[in-house]
Image (tube, rainbow, N blue to C red):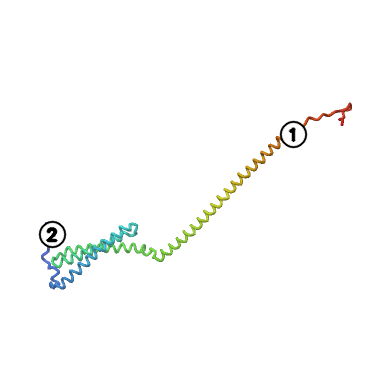
Amino acid sequence: MWESLQPILSPTQYIPHGHCYLWQPSLVWLHLLSDLLTALAYFSIPIILIYFVYKRNDLPFSNVFILFGTFIVLCGLGHLLEIWTLWHPVYWITGVEKAITGLVSFYTALQLVDLLPQFLALRTPEELEAVNRELQAQIAVSTSAHQKLQQSELALRQLNEQLEIKVVERTAELAVVNHRLQENFRLLESVLESIPDPVFLKDCDGRYLK
C-alpha cells in the first residue's frame, strides 16, 4: 500500500520547489511569508462569512456564501501546500488540490451566472429608502384616519349617552304627567258620583215640567 502511495505522498523523482529558487534564503523567505500571510487571510475570510450567515439567517443567497467560503478555504490550502513543496515535492497532491479548487470555483461561477438576474433585481439602498419613506407616509395616513375614526366613535358614543339621558328624562316626565292625569280622572269620577241624579216631572200630556 505504501509503495503505491509513495510516488504521491513522498516522491523522490521530483526536486523540491526550493531548488527553483536556488535555495536563496531571502527568496525562499519571501515566498514562504507571502504564502503564509495569504493563507491566513484566506482562512479568516470564511470564518467571517460563516459568522455573518449565522447571524443573518434570513439572508438570501446563503448558498453563494457557502460556495465562496469553500473556494476561499481551498485557495488558502493551496498556499499552504506551496510552502510545503518548498522542501517536499508533493506535486500530485498540490495538483489534485488545484483541480478541486478549479471545480469549486467553476461551479461557483456557474451559480453566479444563474443568480445574476436576481442580484440585478435587488433594490438599491436609495430605492429601499424611498420605499421606506412611502411606507412611513402610508402609516401616518392610516394612523391619522384611525385617530379620526376613534374621535368619531367617541362623539357618536357621547351622542348616544346624551340621547339615552334625554329619553330617561322624557320618560320620567311622561310618567309624572300620566300620574297627574290619572289623579284628575279619579277626582272627576268622585265629583260626578257625588252629584245627585236629576228628577224630571211630566204632565198628563207627557211634557216635561219646568
| Quadrant of the image containing the N terminus | bottom left
Q: Which residue is drawn at 53% across and 54% down?
A: 151
Q: Nearer the viewer, residue 19 or 38?
A: 38
The answer to whether one can see residue 57 in this image is yes
Q: Which of 93 and 162 is in front in this view?
A: 162
Q: Residue at x 12, y 61 (%)?
A: 6
Q: Nearer the viewer, mark 1 or mark 2?
A: 1
Pointers 1 and 2 in contact (C-beta within 8 Å) = no
Q: Which residue is drawn at 34% across and 64% down?
A: 116
Counting residues from the N terminus, which is met first, the one under dot 1 or under dot 2?
Answer: 2
Could you say where residue 190 lies in the image, as x and y percent from the top left? 72, 33
Q: Give the residue furthest to the top.
A: 204
Task: Give the number of the disc on residue 5.
Answer: 2
Disc 2: CA contacts within 10 A as few (<14), some (14-19) or many (>=20)? few
Amino acid on which the number 2 mark rests in the picture: Leu
Task: Give the number of the disc on residue 114.
Answer: none
Say if 162 sits above or below 178 in the image: below
Q: Residue at x 56, y 50 (%)?
A: 158
Amino acid on which the number 1 mark rests in the picture: Val
- Taking the image as shown, residue 86 lies to the left or right of residue 175, namely left
- Taking the image as shown, residue 19 lies to the left or right of residue 103, namely left
Report which residue position mark 1 lands on.
191
Q: Which of 10 and 18 is in front in this view?
A: 18
Could you say where residue 177 lies in the image, as x and y percent from the top left? 67, 41
| Quadrant of the image containing the C terminus | top right
